[in-house]
Amino acid sequence: MESAFFVIDRVTNACGAPESWPLYSTRLFSILILAALAMVLVQFCTYEASAPSQKTSTEMKGTAYQFRIFQLQYLVVYLLIMLADWLQGTNMYTLYDGYDMPIGTLFLTGFTSSAVFGTFIGLYADKYGRKLGCVVFCILEIIINTLEHYPNFALLMVGRVLGGISTSILFSAFESWMVTEHRARKYPDAWLASTNALASVGNGIMAIVAGVLAQIAADAYGDIGPFRLAILLTAVALVLISMWRENYGTECSSDSSTFSIAFREITTKREIMLVGLVQAFYEGAMYTFVFMWVPTVLKLASEPPPIGVLFACMMVCVTMGGLLFTPLLNLIGIHRVSILICALSGLTMLIPVFSSSYLHVLASFLVLEACVGCWFATSATMRSMYVPEGIQSSIMTVFRIPLNVLVVIGTKMTEFTSPDTVFKSTAAWFFISCVFQIMLKYNANPQKID
């Protein structure tokens, strides 16, 4: 073991790791990277494309090849967008702090905007086109990142309001376009899980890359540097999206008709309601955790921890969680995977309540991030199973209302309650999502929904 650590230490030093970084952090990051690479290697060596394995006919092989082209077309755009999104998150806090702006107010404005406008965004994406929604997202992001250049509270507030709107589009229009296009091309529904898994793994990788690129951009241009790079990446994504073909949701004569259909589906189909509640409570807890982990590790560490390195470690765990999705799906099925993730996530949030050990708490946070990585692919697959593709954007954005309400509650709790109370609440929300998932498993029948 000591010889292994010796090699790791020599390699990290050769790569230019600053001596000020604690030894445990570089070792942890290196071990996680090696573990992730090992998982990739194992999956690559054992992987057999599901399409050709089902039928070896020339026609089926051709379909599989066309599917890979389509998959690449979507994932390149999606991962560019996620990279740009991660770049903004890396330095937003320090940028606002440098502007001497009320950071909490600006952050909560974004979540509130998403809750208020989110419902209508999905309606418009379904009615006027998912591709158009993705184009609007890119334009909004370019405007938002331009506004970040100005230390003016009013302009930054406008940016946060637009940010709430763009977030609703990000988590509805892109996935809805992919699912509808996938089925329009008559690819098997089982292949959706492959795209979702790759998107989850890629998202984790983009987060790691964003940390490095953000540091380079910040060194060159200051805290505004990552936002300038995000503008460039979003512009590239916009060009690629322009090459997509448009698809639409259910045709309705008015926005109110679309909303009525979406609301009726939610209230009359138990499985759709449960899918939405699982997502709302899980992600509400997840986003609340984002506000908690930095102050928690700062409080428990005996010496100032390298936050950037720890963030990178967490993002590697997100990637590893995405890599675990497909094997777990094949082993125990989608519902049990979701139940396992929700329950394990809840348990990780109880560790900070009952332990003051820095290493124990850090380990629990890493496990949670692995669960989150698996969750992204799991939730996307569940939505493709239960949510009608014709109004998928509308339904998904409706459930962002309770999600954002939970995030606002969790964020405000950090101001007037103890950290233990906040962690107990996030654990409770994770366990509630687990209960809803159990109800979904035993009370609903998944099927392809046209």
Image: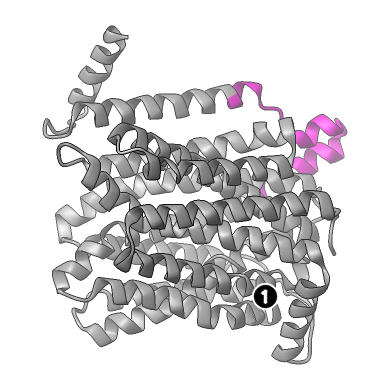
Residue 193 in the image, given as x and y percentages of width and height: 69, 45
| Relative to 391, 223 lies left or right | left
Does the magenta segment cover residue 61? yes
Residue 383 in the image, given as x and y percentages of width and height: 70, 58
Up/down of 200 relative to 331, above or below: below
Q: Secondary structure at mark 1?
A: helix
Q: Is residue 21 visible?
A: yes
| Along the viewing direction, whichever of 407 and 97 lies nearer the viewer | 407
Residue drawn 59% across the image and 43% down it: 343
According to the picture, the residue beneath numbered tag 1 turns out to be: 394
Q: Is residue 80 visible?
A: no
Quarter of the figure that contains the N terminus: top left
> Furthest-left residue in view?
20
Residue drawn 22% across the image and 46% down it: 298
Q: Quadrant of residue 396?
A: bottom right
| Along the viewing direction, whichever of 301 and 210 lies nearer the viewer | 301
Amino acid at dot 1:
Ser
Residue 5 in the image, given as x and y percentages of width and height: 27, 15
Query: What are the residue bounds of the magenta stretch?
Result: 43-70
Residue 199 in the image, given as x and y percentages of width and height: 56, 48
| Along the viewing direction, whichever of 333 and 347 lies nearer the viewer | 347
Up/down of 51 relative to 158, above or below: above
